[in-house]
């Protein structure tokens, strides 16, 4: 069973990812930490609490983390894809949380969960990497407790917030470089190149609505998100970026990976936030790029879509 912590900025696709982790019999969800990103920290934190309430997982502690990037101000805060509340304007379909966040903040909770763990833990950062960069800087002795990071972020060929950059990495490139380049924790990077290929269509969404009470609530969050991605993709549907990463976090090997040295563009030019992957056969670590990270490049897409639905299906 995967021992899992999610670091997140919910987000419609984050909502689906959190629900899968909360409901899956193959996941031991130890905690959820929140970060600024799709919307501001107060909203991402409230969304996380409401999602866990929906899933009946009040046992999972939630802590609020960074409300801004490590170094430079965030160029813009709210995402057009996710609306002003982070859930496409439909956060009210989720139950009000019956509790508050735990004291001490996200980094303290991450450290505490790792310290108490008797087996290595997978951390799935599916928002900006600010909290994870702070954890690795402040608690380097806990790195052996991290089995791996499964990071949703980056783009090898082309971005979504700019021609080169993906939103999560672009939101805090310095933090991303600290995690993906300057450190040695095992990492799987799940980029846009793959998540876009795993987009779901209207038939999948209808099946989601039929998964039970939780699937119906998640489906109610999607109309504006679908409209955004229908325009972006050119066909009706939406991309469930973070859920793709969570399936890999729960079931290692779901995604096919390729080892690539990485770097992150931290200048203020048009490529700020870009992931630079060195795919040369003879590429060597040490020339400004990290040691190789495992970049997700392929999967059985039909099987993945089925796994997503299965993770959300109501169980008697």
Image: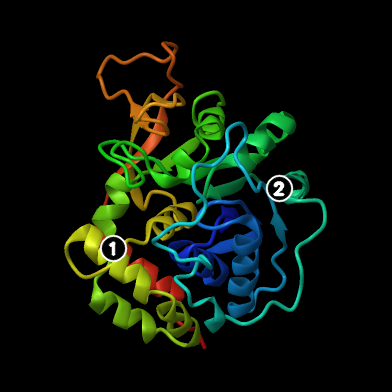
Mark found first going from the N terminus, 2 or 1: 2
- Residue 300 visible: no
- 200 is higher (above) or lower (below) than 205: above
- Residue 9 visible: yes
- 162 is higher (above) or lower (below) than 215: above
Give the residue at the far top of this rendering.
Answer: 287
Residue 110, disc:
2
Give the residue at the far right of this rendering.
Answer: 103
- 121 is higher (above) or lower (below) than 177: below
Direction from residue 188 to residue 184 in the image, left or right: right
Residue at position x 27%, y 39% from top? Answer: 158
In this rendered view, identify the residue nearer to me: 96 or 286: 96
Residue 151, disc:
none
Report helix, strand or loop for mark 2: helix
| Mark 2, other Cα within 10 Å: few <14 / some 14–19 / many ≥20 | many
Direction from residue 104 to residue 199 in the image, left or right: left
Q: Quadrant of residue 267?
A: top left
Residue at position x 36%, y 53% from top? Answer: 254
In this rendered view, identify the residue nearer to me: 103 or 116: 103
Q: Quadrant of residue 239?
A: bottom left
Mark 1 lies on residue? 229
Direction from residue 96 to residue 250 in the image, left or right: left
- Residue 221: image x %, image y %? 44, 76
For the N terminus, which image quadrant?
Answer: bottom right
In this rendered view, identify the residue nearer to me: 224 or 244: 224
Residue at position x 55%, y 56% from top? Answer: 9
Numbered label tally: 2
């Amino acid at each position: 069973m995967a021992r899992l912590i999610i670091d997140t900025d919910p987000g419609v696709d984050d909502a689906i990812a959190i629900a899968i982790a909360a409901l899956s019999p193959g996941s031991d969800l130890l905690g959820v930490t929140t970060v600024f990103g799709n919307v501001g920290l107060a909203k991402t934190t409230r969304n996380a609490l409401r999602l866990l309430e929906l899933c009946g997982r009040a046992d999972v502690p939630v802590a609020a983390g960074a409300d801004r990037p490590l170094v430079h101000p965030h160029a813009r805060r709210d995402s057009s894809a996710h609306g002003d509340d982070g859930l496409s304007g439909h956060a009210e379909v989720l139950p009000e949380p019956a509790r508050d966040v735990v004291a001490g903040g996200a980094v303290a909770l991450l450290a505490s969960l790792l310290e108490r763990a008797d087996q290595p833990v997978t951390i799935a950062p599916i928002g900006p990497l600010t909290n994870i960069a702070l954890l690795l800087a402040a608690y380097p002795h806990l790195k052996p407790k991290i089995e791996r990071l499964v990071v949703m972020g980056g783009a090898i060929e082309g971005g979504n917030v700019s021609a080169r950059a993906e939103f999560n990495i672009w939101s805090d490139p310095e933090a991303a470089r600290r995690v993906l380049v300057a450190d040695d924790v095992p990492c799987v990077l799940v980029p846009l190149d793959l998540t876009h290929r795993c987009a779901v269509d209207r038939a999948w969404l209808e099946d989601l609505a039929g998964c039970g009470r939780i699937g119906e609530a998640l489906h109610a969050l999607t109309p504006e998100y679908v409209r955004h991605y229908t325009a972006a993709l050119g066909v009706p549907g939406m991309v469930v970026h973070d859920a793709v990463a969570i399936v890999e976090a729960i079931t290692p090997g779901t995604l096919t990976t390729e080892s690539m040295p990485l770097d992150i563009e931290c200048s203020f030019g048009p490529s700020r936030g870009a992931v630079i992957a060195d795919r040369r056969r003879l590429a060597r670590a040490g020339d400004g790029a990290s040691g190789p990270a495992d970049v997700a490049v392929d999967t059985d897409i039909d099987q993945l879509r089925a796994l997503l639905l299965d993770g959300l299906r109501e169980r008697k």
